[in-house]
Amino acid sequence: MTAVVNLALPYPPSGNKYWRMVMGRMVRSKVANAYIATVGRMNRGRTPLFGPVVVSGQVIRPRAIGDLENSLKILFDALNGVAWLDDGQIRGFEHLYRVDSVDGVGRVDLQVIGDRFCTDDEVARFFEAKTTASARRKATRARNRAANKYQGLHATSASYPPRTK
């Protein structure tokens, strides 16, 4: 059995506008979050594909600048949880083209082919595992920050040789 997802989406924002540095950390920008929210709203209720997928279609850019690769990275991040669970499921591309718009309006027309759609239980388990992993990473970062702060207050840390008189 083959499962197919057809998507008609707005053109993604530039990769230069996707990430921002905030308080020493790289985070997605407001423009990126707005694009991801738009893609999610346009595809509300869609069940993602399970297992390996193949992507085909065309990216119609509004102006003759930018490359296909940067557009795809942002687009595929936005399609996580919509067309597939994670963009790591993409195993190949078939007939993927970049075309220049004649009317100045960019858009993306994609067809994603997989073996089957996810069950509700598989989707729930995937996002639960993703949330758990995120919480673990956050706790590890907090522990490391605390350890670095604590270590900086003591002159005789285990990482430094003891002082000799």
Image (tube, rainbow, N blue to C red):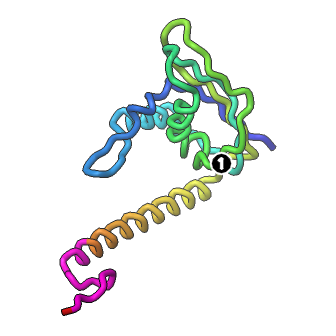
Type of secondary structure dominating the magenta stretch: loop
Q: Closer to the camera, 7 or 12?
A: 12
| Furthest-right residue in this view | 1
Q: Residue at x 36, y 69 (%)?
A: 139
Q: Which residues are magenta?
A: 149-164
Quadrant in which the N terminus is drawn: top right
Label count reads 1
Q: Is residue 152 left or right of residue 133?
A: left
Q: Secondary structure at mark 1?
A: helix
Query: Residue 156 lies in magenta, yes or no?
Result: yes
Q: Amino acid at mark 1?
A: Gln
Q: Is residue 66 above or below residue 153?
A: above
Give x and y (percent) for residue 7: 60, 29
| Furthest-bottom residue in this view | 165
Quadrant in which the C terminus is drawn: bottom left
Q: Closer to the camera, 27 or 42?
A: 27
